[in-house]
Amino acid sequence: MPRPYQRCTNCVMDTTDSQITFDQRGVCDHCRTYYAHTLPAWDTGPTGRAELERIVDRIRAEGKGKDFDCIMGMSGGIDSSFLTHIAKAELGLRPLVFHVDAGWNSQQAVNNIERLVDGLGLDLFTQVIDWEEMRDLQLAFFKAGVPHLDVPQDHAFFATMYDFAAKYNIKTILTGANYSTECVRNPTEWMYFATDVRQILDIHRRFGTRPLAQFPLSNVLRHKVWLRYGRGIKVERPLNYVPYMKEAAMDLLVERYGWQRYPQKHFESRFTRFYEGYWLPGKFGYDTRKVQYSSLILTKQMTREDAIERLAHPAYDPATVSQDFEYVATKLGISVTELEGYFRAPNRTYRDYRSQAQTFAIGARVMKWLGLERAGKR
Ligand SMILES: [Zn+2]
């Protein structure tokens, strides 16, 4: 029997997240995790700043005599753009800015990357993913019927970055991951781990049509264990130590660098815009705005009323749906009819394919036990 609809009384997460639980006051487990674990450990005042200074000192010391002291990924979206500004303008670090071009950059993304990199006098390295392989892997995910269609893109981003850090012996990777805009995480059933290489290979084996010869792949055990402890490559999240308010950050970037705004988080990729704005809510009933808005509600950047009002309207402008359907289909080398067929095909989950889900579950428990992970992903 389907569960009756219920929405959290504190944020806007609801029973479209099938594993959500509520307490007697109707407050969901995302909110409870935030108040119990994330908030108490999150400090953007003097204590956080001092912690960040220690990290920066270490990064500088490790980078002495090298061209760069750290590496950071840049998508052109708000989190990575603001991180670029903080890293150079505020912390005086010498990051190599890394961009992975998976073929779907929006015009704003390209503009924003150029503006930030030029404005701050940084070096940009762009890795272009072999398009035929990318296309084939993305199509395989469509054929698999799973919701996590963004995995090929996400995996390529971070696998390339780890490869680069290892190859050039850069000890620190900066990421724009942060509590301020991401303290509520997409449920695993909505967006399964992009780091699960076994799942990628299984879906590719069943639905792919050409070998993945160039495509960057990284096993989670390699980068979380070997590169971390064997090679000493650490991932830091500077945005968690400084005040980061999304609107104010965007204003600063617009004014100072000529940055361009997006209508929605993650819309810097044309694929992600189509996928999160149209495909996920339309096919699966998963609206990632609920996760994004809930994060902003918890961090006091949006009111719940405002979020509910916005959610009443689709994320996607209906006028552009057919246009984007055609764009995505053409780019993937298939007909609109074929793409529509995948949209109507039965929905599957990550559980329908081989995965490292158990490895991830153990890893998550260890991280929590060691106090290394405060935000809750489930
Ligand atoms: Zn909630």
Image: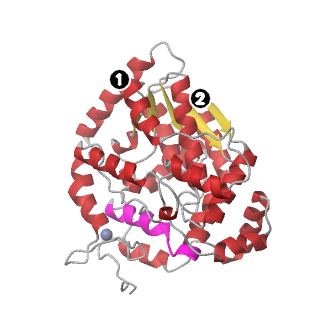
Is residue 269 placed above or below 24 in the rendered structure? above
Residue neighbourhood size for the residue with mark 1, other residues' Cα within 10 Å, grouped as few (<14), some (14–19), many (≥20):
few
Is residue 303 placed above or below 182 in the rendered structure? below
| Res 344 → quadrant | bottom right
Secondary structure mostly seen in the magenta stretch? helix
Give, as a single range, the part of the protein colored magenta. 281-298
Residue type pointed to by label 2: Gly
Residue type pointed to by label 1: Arg
| Residue furthest out toward the top | 65
Q: Quadrant of ligand 1?
A: bottom left
| Residue appearing at x 70%, y 45% in the figure | 211
Label 1 SS: helix
| Res 91 → quadrant | top left
Sequence order check, earlier mark of 2 and 1: 1
Q: Viewer-nearest of labels 2 and 1? A: 1
Along the line of sight, the residue nearer the viewer: 92 or 170: 170
Along the line of sight, the residue nearer the viewer: 344 or 295: 344
Instruction: Give the labeled residue for mark 2.
Output: 121
